[in-house]
Image (spheres, rainbow, N blue to C red):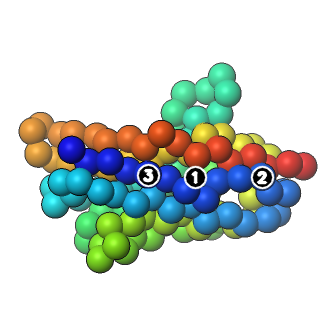
Amino acid sequence: QVQPVESGGGLVQAGGSLRLSCAASGSIFSINVMGWYRQAPGNQRELVARIASGGTTNYADSVKGRFTISRDNAKNTVYLQMNSLKPEDTAVYYCNLHSPWGGGMDYWGKGTLVTVSS
């Protein structure tokens, strides 16, 4: 079983920065895509950014130029550097690990709360 564990959330003023980390444990050899999603109150969960094992990245339009996703394969960790934070970035951020095995499996962390004050 794969278990992602997030850390790094908190309260920050608008314009500030935070870095989220997600450490993966368990049978991670099958994981090819690591990503971050977020869910604000009353909203659906949405993709923020993801990075494939080869380094290809995708970002939501709302965070392009402000957020950067990276991964350290040796540490089985994915990071999300968030700069120029806005109040609308306030949400619970979830780490997602995707495996193509078994028709596709997704593993989710429990989430970390990011609150951006104006």
- Report if residue 83 is visible in the image: yes
Mark earlier in primary sequence (2, 3): 3
Q: Nearer the viewer, residue 18 or 56?
A: 18
Residue neighbourhood size for the residue with mark 2, other residues' Cα within 10 Å, grouped as few (<14), some (14–19), many (≥20): some
Residue 5 numbered tag: 3
Residue 13: x and y, percent? 85, 57
> Who's the residue at 52% across and 33% down the image?
45
Residue 11 numbered tag: 2
Cα distance in 3D space between marks 2 and 1: 23 Å
Residue 118 numbered tag: none
- From the image, tell me which residue sits under label 1: 61
Locate residue 91: give its quadrant.
top right
Q: How many marks?
A: 3
> Is disc 3 placed on a helix, strand or loop?
strand
> Who's the residue at 82% across and 63% down the image?
15
- Report if residue 89 is visible in the image: no
Furthest residue in direction left, as rendered: 102
Q: Amino acid at mark 2?
A: Leu
Furthest residue in direction right, as rendered: 118
**Residue 72 versus residue 102 in the image, above or below:** below
In the figure, is residue 6 to the left or right of 29?
A: right
**Residue 106 versus residue 27 in the image, above or below:** above
> Is disc 2 placed on a helix, strand or loop?
strand
Residue 105: x and y, percent? 21, 39
Q: Nearer the viewer, residue 102 or 61?
A: 102
Mark earlier in primary sequence (2, 1): 2
Cα distance in 3D space between marks 2 and 3: 19 Å
Mark earlier in primary sequence (3, 1): 3
Residue neighbourhood size for the residue with mark 1, other residues' Cα within 10 Å, grouped as few (<14), some (14–19), many (≥20): few
Q: Considering the image in quadrants, where does the N terminus appear?
A: top left
